[in-house]
Amino acid sequence: MPSYGYTLMTEQSGPRQLVRYAAAAERAGFDFEVMSDHYFPWLREQGHAGYAWSMLGAVSQVTDRVELMTYVTCPIMRYHPAVVAQKAATVGVLSDGRFTLGLGAGENLNEHVVGQGWPPVNVRHEMLDESITIIRGLLGGGDVNFAGQYFRVDSARLWDLPERPVEIGVAVSGEQSVTRFAPMADHLIAVEPEPALVQRWDQCAGARQSRKIGQLPICWDRSRDRAVERAHREFRWFGGGWKVNAELAGPAGFAGATQFVRPEDVADSIPCGPDLEAIVAAVREYEKAGFTDVAVVQIGDEGQDEFLEVAERELVPALRAG
């Protein structure tokens, strides 16, 4: 049976608000919660970018049931992979084994802050490959020494590990990333309902069972016009696609790249307004493509409380009725 999740968007809400939404989303009946891990918002209008790992620690203490996940953390520049493994293990302990580590090759938006430039995608994939090897070894409880092309680890070991080992999901978008990371990861992460992506993942992963975890932006509001305006204001960056978005260096770049995106363009690709049937239909597209888990992104901080009330009364039951 599919699982339905709620996204804790660090770019559009402050830390205290996100912790409160996490508790409300569990009460609303969502199965899992994913959290973005950014240093910058995509657009200034979003207005936030708190530290995900501090918030995850807090969320682990105000929830009891929902699974938690980063969606996604980049372990190749801003964070050293040995430190990512330590953070993941600690959240795993705090959450009593409810945490999955979602990893990806990152965005210039967040990684440029450490002043090391921004490598091409093939190099980023090589760096992520080494990172996963290091993280996997540490989460497995062993002593890790590693000397790679990009990373070195000297006599590392994690001293606090959850009883249930932290599993790893990796964000992929095409043949190159799927072929490389499906054999290394436990689960697929993607933001488009592409059946070919899922099928290729299963071919590369072999007999091992894995979850396919997708994410769907929505903008619920009792007023469709208000929903379209908010989605355009805060989420017009989404239409550029990850191959473009990963290269832009800051909110100003995203503002320039999206200056000609119209509200109606956003509304064509994101369910906007009070029509829950449209949201359910969009989720079903992921399920048809083979995804086992879908997390919705309710766009904008305003109206989150009302959305979560509606989700508890109507949306989550409608998703489960499918």
Image (cartoon, rainbow, N blue to C red):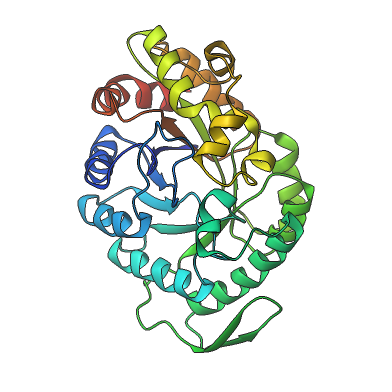
Asked if 239 appears above or below 21 in the picture, the reply is above
Q: Is residue 304 left or right of residue 186?
A: left
Residue 156 in percent (x, y) is at 48, 87
On the image, the x and y values in percent for residue 267 come to 53, 14
Report x, y in % for residue 164. 41, 68
The answer to whether residue 31 is left or right of residue 184 is left
Instruction: Decide which of 310, 313 is in the foreground and name it.
Output: 310
- In this image, 112 relative to 118: left or right? left
Residue drawn 32% across the image and 19% down it: 314
What residue is at 38 percent from the left and 19 percent from the top?
220
Residue shown at 22% from the left, 45% from the top: 16
Residue 7 pos. (x, y %)? 40, 39
Image quadrant of residue 121?
Answer: bottom right
**Residue 251 visible to the viewer:** yes
Q: Is residue 107 visible?
A: no
Residue drawn at the location 50% of the way across and 59% of the way down: 113
